[in-house]
Amino acid sequence: MNTPLHIAVAGLGTVGAGTLKLLQTHGEMLRQRCGRAIVVSAVSARDKGRDRGVDLDGMEWHDDAAAMAAQSGAEVVVELIGGADGVAKAVCEAAIASGKHVVTANKALLAHHGTALALAAEAKGVSLGFEAAVAGGVPIIKALREGLAANGLSRIYGILNGTCNYILTTMRETGAKFEAVLADAQELGYAEADPSFDIDGIDAAHKLAILTSVAFGCEVNFPAVHIEGIRDISSLDIQFAGELGYKIKLLGIARLTGSGVEQRVHPCLVPLAAPIAHVEGVFNAVVAEGDFVDTTVYQGRGAGAGPTASAVVADLVDIARGHRVPTFAVPATALAKIPARPMERHRGAYYIRLMVVDKPGVIADVTAAFRDEEISLESMLQRGRAPGEAVPVILITHDTEESAMSRALEKIAILEAVADPPRMIRIEGF
Ligand code: HSE
């Protein structure tokens, strides 16, 4: 029998404890599949005394995770601490510098330092595995890097944040308010420690930046992602979207164009018939479009101890088997520097909701602003009649350029009869 693969685990929170539990549950099965056992020889966490429901007997305990990464005799360091910088980064850098493979679930770290870490790992001849960083248990990194390796990819998009998908689904199904549903999501353990990472779209943007690099073979460029969250989505918009044949989803969308890479995270109206519209609750989904394979769809649980541990251990299995692939699908030294396509150049249809005072001439002023920017309207809907009071007016446009839409909305926002700031949600055709 081959020698075991010794691993050191930094961080014993939900995912760390879940990983140990999986390794203990499936130890024999994994030994057969890898041809060698995977053995946890060292662990590090903040509180040694805490009961995590897993047996730590026989494992070295380290108070200092970075020192463990540098000094332990393990072949692999599994980083499950989280955070873009600080201890998590120090652990990964120390592991790589001392010639150890790294497996991490840390999307923020990869989004901010992915290219540098990949360069360092590949220079040292070690693996940097991060299947668990994107869409939890959905094996999307392996699918893109290996299963779709024969395809040119031009677009990838998906539901990358389970908390937002849960909130939007529950608001639609129950009519409950945003804040109440967010509190439920936090209780269920899906939300990030700082929930603004979820609801402001940052967590989805971290994951999108990683997917973009793997899909298009370019350097990770998180600062180039256009990010909007779901704080401003109201039950009214969810209800109108439904009446018009759409659901509202927070999507991450990356597209390779002749003039650069477009990366955007924002709420979208998606047609009820689109596969992504059926992905509800905490589930994640990714759609990848390849030139030979056509459209492929991947779906599953994007968070939680079991699904995330499944992805962490899949990376460990690759390492145990000696299966090596370039970190971001092409060698890190060959990752392209592709310019970012600015959001102002985005073209698409738009849903606009205005609260306007119900009096003669208001719609003429609103439509004049669209006419001046050469924006063509597809349909318009006004519900209720309350002379002198604000009523919702919904406008759906034909495809237009984002810059024209921004200018039109600036003019509309200052009209005297427009009560609240206009609400704009982009429509995705798929
Ligand atoms: N907070 C994330 C989500 C979990 O809600 O999807 C894992 O990335």
Image (cartoon, rainbow, N blue to C red):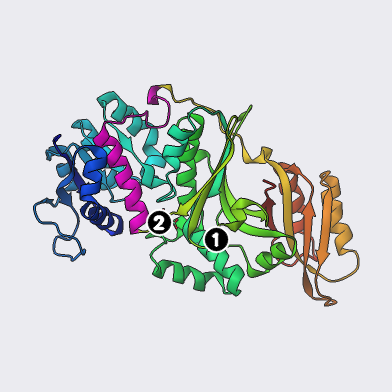
- The residue at 12%/40% (across/down) is 72
Label 1 residue near ligand 1, CB within 8 Å: no
Say whether residue 368 is left or right of residue 250: right
Q: Which residue is mark 2?
A: 303
Would you say the magenta stretch is mainly helix, strand or loop?
helix
Snapshot quadrant of residue 237? bottom right
* Residue 227, visible in the rendered structure: no
Q: Which residues are magenta?
A: 305-333
Label 2 residue near ligand 1, CB within 8 Å: yes
On residue 221, the disc is none
Amino acid under disc 1:
Glu
Mark 2 secondary-structure assignment: loop
Q: Residues within 10 Å of mark 2 (few under 14, many from 20)?
A: many
x and y percent of residue 133 in the render?
39, 46
x and y percent of residue 345 in the render?
68, 37
Structural distance between the alpha carbons of marks 2 and 1 = 14 Å
x and y percent of residue 12 in the render?
23, 56
Q: Nearer the viewer, residue 288 or 353?
A: 288
Say whether residue 30 is left or right of residue 169: left
Q: Residue furthest right?
A: 360
Mark 1 secondary-structure assignment: loop
Q: Which residue is mark 1?
A: 280
Q: Nearer the viewer, residue 226 or 5?
A: 5
